[in-house]
Amino acid sequence: MIEACDIEDFLAHIDRHGVIDARSESEFAKGHIPGSFNVPLLTNEHRVQVGTLYKQLGKEAAILKGFQLAGPRFYDIFKSMRKHAEGQALGIYCWRGGMRSNILAWMMNLADYKVSLLKGGYKSYRQYVHRLFEQPWKWVVVSGKTGVGKTKVLHALKEKGQQVLDFEGLAHHKGSAFGHLGEKPQPSVEQFENLIGWELRRFDPDEPIWIENESRFIGTVRIPDALFNQTLDMPVIELETSEAKRRKIILDEYGRFPVNELKDATEKLERKLGGDRMKFACEALESGNFDGWLDVLLPYYDKTYNHSGLLRKGDSISFAIENYNDQELEELVKIKNRIWKK
């Protein structure tokens, strides 16, 4: 049986069953519905051939060429889709919900699979994501200087059942010159948006969402303007802790990386640090003097933080954090509840 589904029903399906993206490898790499698997009906090379023929000779010639190219691959395509199916149910989509997904659906239906087709295809998911971005959300912005433990606090709050949107986790980047260390390659800007939408769809819009104070750009990706602009007027909880604690958190996070990687990242800050300070920081790293390295970096990052704070217009509440324990986390939740008068 083949059933055409709207985006909401299709996303409910993807939580329970396997979902196939029938587009080419390059289309999938640029952006796809999170959790889906790529089984291209036409490969990158085939898609170029069919597209060229469509422009030159029209639709029918392109369709015939597509069948000629895809036909010999049907056996392997079927095996790939079957591997990703959950039981006898499968979801399938392509760019607009047209020929590619319908052909794969026909193939699986012949084998008695129950197939859900996404109306409007991947394009409908992109539209759905942008509608989520435009929706008003309640935000609580966790701010604080480098090393205060913002990410650590957010992860702990998430474990307590709070709604947390971890932009840096989705971006595979911690947002600084050193933010790429130990991370997977960053997603495309489009896929970053897809991942944000995937998280937002699970959230209760009546409940506040915790986020970290970020700039628009996190490495090579950008927080969607519709979301970022919402956060500018939202309340800010500014975490404060001792410099000793900050240094320990930074060294726990970055001290495990090879010195040459830390040096390469430090050298990228030469224009902002100045040549002499950058050179001193690198020499400190080479000699194992991490405190000396931080003596150069912390004033720079503190100055950057003080400047970035000018962008935010929401009320700011300072909160001293030292032990990162349940008691402190519970107090943060109480502050959030007072802010939003729960």
Image: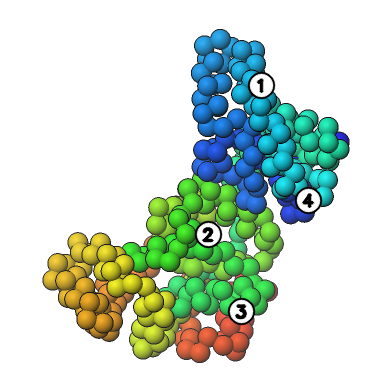
Tell us which disc is closer to us: 3 or 2: 2
SS at circle 3: helix
Q: CA distance from mark 3 to mark 2?
A: 23 Å
Q: Are marks 4 and 2 in contact (CB under 8 Å)?
A: no
Instruction: Tell me the crowding category of disc 3: few under 14, some 14 to 19, or many 20 or more residues within 10 angstroms, Cα based.
Output: some
Residue at point 77%, 32% (across, down): 107
Residue 170, labelled with which disc? 2
SS at circle 1: helix
Q: Which residue is mark 3?
A: 333
Q: Is residue 88 left or right of residue 20?
A: right
Residue 28, labelled with which disc? none
Residue 51: percent from left, percent from top: 54, 21
Tell us which disc is closer to us: 4 or 2: 4
Q: What's under tag 4, amino acid-wise?
A: Glu
Q: What's under tag 2, amino acid-wise?
A: Leu
Residue 245: percent from left, percent from top: 40, 87
Which scheme is used to colour this image of the protein?
Answer: rainbow
Q: CA distance from mark 1 to mark 2?
A: 38 Å
Tell us which disc is closer to us: 4 or 3: 4
Residue 313: percent from left, percent from top: 44, 65
Q: CA distance from mark 1 to mark 4?
A: 27 Å
Q: Which residue is mark 1?
A: 67
Instruction: Tell me the crowding category of disc 1: few under 14, some 14 to 19, or many 20 or more residues within 10 angstroms, Cα based.
Output: some
